[in-house]
Amino acid sequence: MAETTIELFEKAVRQHSRRLLTIARAIVGNRASPEDVVQQAVSNLFEHRDRYDWREPGGLMRRTVVNEALRVLRTPRMAPVSDDHPGGGRTPVGGMIDRETVEAVRKAIDELPEHFRAALVLCEYENMSYVQIAEILNASVPQVKTWLHRGRRQLAQRLKHLAWDGGGSKRLEDAETQ
């Protein structure tokens, strides 16, 4: 028996809600409630549910959450990335990077311009292609590449004090003083 639009919609929300919340949390941080962002996005989709094909709704739902998160953030300053950001509690390289480093990276991400941050979150955390990011952010692929390049360059500049030497045992700033 064929599922109705409402059944397909409800199934899509159940399947994707955790991922949508992760995306919203990564973009809005503590500036706004990520739950409210997802709820508003889902409400908007429900209101217009008959316009969409709900058999493969992942891209549509991600795009809607990103758009809603960016709408909420249209004020001048973005909020810090929350402690329960994707991967919260787990640090890169099997837990070998200390909390101080994680906090420095979060702070550096917080300081990025909104469009650089959104592009980086979608690329690095959501593993989206440039084309998908361009669609979601309503930009061209070359613009997305530019935002990613500039965002990564700004992150590298802000985090250069955390770089490790070739042996991996000392920070470069410590090695230079010896």
Image: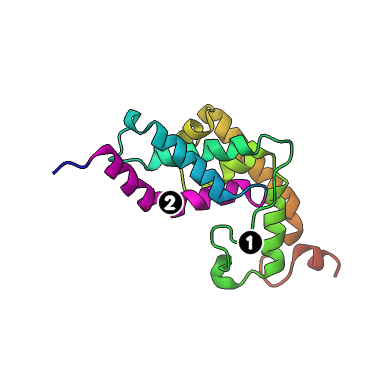
Amino acid type at image mark 2: Ser
For disc 2, the marked residue is 17
Front-lying residue, 20 or 156: 20
Q: 178 above or below 7?
A: below
Q: 71 above or below 160?
A: above
Which quarter of the rendered picture does the N terminus lie within? top left
Q: Marks 1/2: CA distance? A: 19 Å
Q: 155 above or below 89?
A: above
Residue 57 appears in the figure: yes
Callout 2 crowding tier (Cα within 10 Å): few <14, some 14–19, many ≥20: some
Q: 59 above or below 92?
A: above
Q: Residue at x 56, y 33 (%)?
A: 144
Front-lying residue, 69 or 145: 69
Q: Position of residue 174 (x, y in %)?
A: 81, 68
Give SS at disc 1: loop
Q: Please say whether residue 14 is one of the residues in the magenta stretch.
A: yes
Left/right placement of residue 98 relative to residue 58 reads right
Q: Please say whether residue 25 is one of the residues in the magenta stretch.
A: yes
Q: Residue at x 57, y 64 (%)?
A: 88
Callout 1 crowding tier (Cα within 10 Å): few <14, some 14–19, many ≥20: some
**For the magenta stretch, what is the residue range?**
4-30
Q: Position of residue 43 (x, y in %)?
A: 45, 39
Q: Quick one: which residue is furthest to the left in this view? A: 1
Q: In terms of secondary structure, what is the magenta stretch mainly?
A: helix
Q: Residue at x 68, y 44 (%)?
A: 153
Give SS at disc 2: helix
Amino acid type at image mark 1: Asp
For disc 1, the marked residue is 83
